[in-house]
Image (spheres, helix red, strand yellow):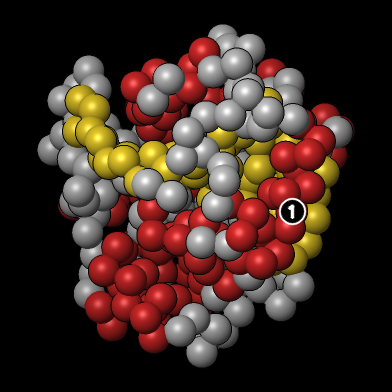
Amino acid sequence: MATIAGTITVSDGSVLHYESRGKPSSEHPSFVFLHYYGGSPSTWAPLLNRPAFRELHTICYHARGWTPSTGPQEPGAYGIKAMSSDLSAILSATGLHDSRAGFVLVGHSMGAKVAQHYAATAVTLYLKGLILVAPAPLLGLDPPAETKRQQATAYQNAESVEFVLNHVLTAGPGTLTKDVTATCVRDSLRGNKWAKKAWPEYVSGEDYGDLMDKIGVRTLVLRGDKDFERDIVGSMGLDLGWINRGVVDCGHLIPLEQPMVLEKEISAFMQQVS
């Protein structure tokens, strides 16, 4: 299936790089994937190469400040509102803002917080659902001091990235193949100074919890049983009817650790919203 690469420039001058694969269908929604802090469209490659996605229309993009996307040289330019606005621009540029079959947002960690904010604030009839993968919550996240310290120093060099991959983000050493680890290291080192600092310093703590009840679409939450944030975040949106499911023998990087499980969950979700 052909992949089309494109760029858009948003109002503050940030240039966002995206990849669109396949064509929109009148029978099922398109899927838009938002990566985690330090990730990229490559995070989704093991999933998108699975059989269920061969005929689907999918869009991935690099968040602002994560190469090849660019971002302002300003510390405050990487908040959730800015990234939610970027998502809106991507949807408009790719025609999904008024696609008849609609679209589903699949957000991972940081990307899941962005997806929630968009779902709560955007005026659209075309958003069909949310799949939140190891999500950061809309309300401010206040992790233990040691976790904050690890996040602040995680992406300094290849050795620090590998340590976090093996001992924090996954179920344990050896979970990821050498090739996948190398890709993760590359991606995590490609953030500009302010993009790297933003998440641990203030973005993860931004509190938009009062917007949760404004999300009116079907929502699925997936969390690994060995996710370092499982006990910090807990279940999400139960009072709003959100479905929470666990992923066995999995850490924070579900798209890389358990792509077959994620494929199954997304396929079932698609049947429910198509």
**Which residue is outermost to the bottom?**
174
> Residue 75 appears at what percent x and percent y?
22, 38
> Residue 83 appears at what percent x and percent y?
38, 32
- How many residues crowd mark 1 within 10 Å: few (<14), some (14–19), many (20+)? some
Q: Which residue is painted at 35% across and 46% down in the image? A: 3
Q: Is residue 115 above or below residue 37?
A: above
Instruction: Tell me the residue that label 1 is attached to.
Output: 265
Looking at the rendered image, the quarter that the C terminus falls into is top right
Q: Which residue is painted at 71% across and 77% down in the image? A: 249
Residue 27: image quadrant is: top right
The residue closer to the viewer here, 13 or 153, is 13
Q: Is residue 141 above or below residue 45?
A: above
Secondary structure under tag 1 reads: helix
Q: Is residue 179 above or below residue 245?
A: below
Tell me if residue 12 can be seen: yes
Q: Amino acid at mark 1?
A: Glu
Q: Which residue is painted at 20% across and 25% down in the image? A: 9
Q: Is residue 169 left or right of residue 171?
A: left
